[in-house]
Amino acid sequence: MKKDIQISYEYFKNSSELSDIEKQLFERAKEARENAYAPYSQFLVGCSVLLENGEIYSGNNQENAAYPSGLCAERTTVFWVAANFPDLKIEKIFVVGGPKEFHEKNPPIPPCGACRQSLMEYETKQNENIDLYFSSMNEEVVKVHAVKDLLPFYFDSTFL
Ligand code: THU
């Protein structure tokens, strides 16, 4: 029996189409990207998180001379948020990435597989979907309405 999985997403050709809070998140992620520590890849990623109380926190990728010891922007940010505000739900996550020498044609940067799994943990924990946005610096934005949309057949605590 053949089955299909479908996901829907929103595509914004320009960030001017975003709502005010989405624009704020975009700006905060871009600002955070500037402080990324990525001397090895020269690929800078920023991430911002909107909590249910309206506060926004941000972070970026942190690399390491022992390459696998570094961490992506999404996990750096969300782990910090979860460590400090364990009882507040995450409403939105915005990711902005691209090479340091940015080129107009660079496409929106989707979260890597390990980040999808890590973010999924918090969506499961809070039992509420998280809007996830990803973008390049050229203002194109993709939005999915849940982390699980980017992770079909996800593994979570319900299987344990
Ligand atoms: N990176 C992120 O921060 N997030 C992603 O989702 C993709 C990759 C970082 C990891 C590494 O520091 C650099 O980008 C190049 O892979």
Image: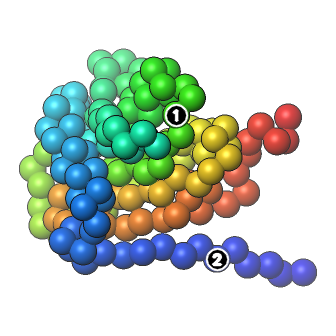
Whichever of labels 1 and 2 marks the residue nearer the N terminus, that label is 2
Please tell me how crowded label 2 is: few (under 14), some (14-19), or many (20+) other residues with Cα within 10 Å.
Answer: few
Q: Name the residue under label 2.
A: 6
Q: Looking at the image, which is closer to me, 47 or 154? A: 47
Please tell me how crowded label 1 is: few (under 14), some (14-19), or many (20+) other residues with Cα within 10 Å.
Answer: few
Residue 52 image label: none
Find residue 75 and report its horizontal and vertical position in percent. Answer: 44, 34
The residue at 55%/26% (across/down) is 86
Asked which secondary structure carries label 2, the reply is loop
Asked which secondary structure carries label 1, the reply is loop
Q: Looking at the image, which is closer to me, 135 or 103? A: 135
- Give the residue type at disc 1: Leu
Q: In which quarter of the image is residue 134?
A: bottom left
Find residue 51 and report its horizontal and vertical position in percent. Answer: 43, 41
User: Which is in the foreground here, disc 1 or disc 2?
Assistant: 1
Query: Which quarter of the rendering shows the C terminus?
Result: top right
Q: In which quarter of the image is residue 147?
A: bottom right
Q: Quadrant of residue 47?
A: top left
How many marks overall? 2
Q: Mark 1 points at which residue?
A: 88
Query: Which quarter of the rendering shows the N terminus?
Result: bottom right
The residue at 19%/50% (across/down) is 27
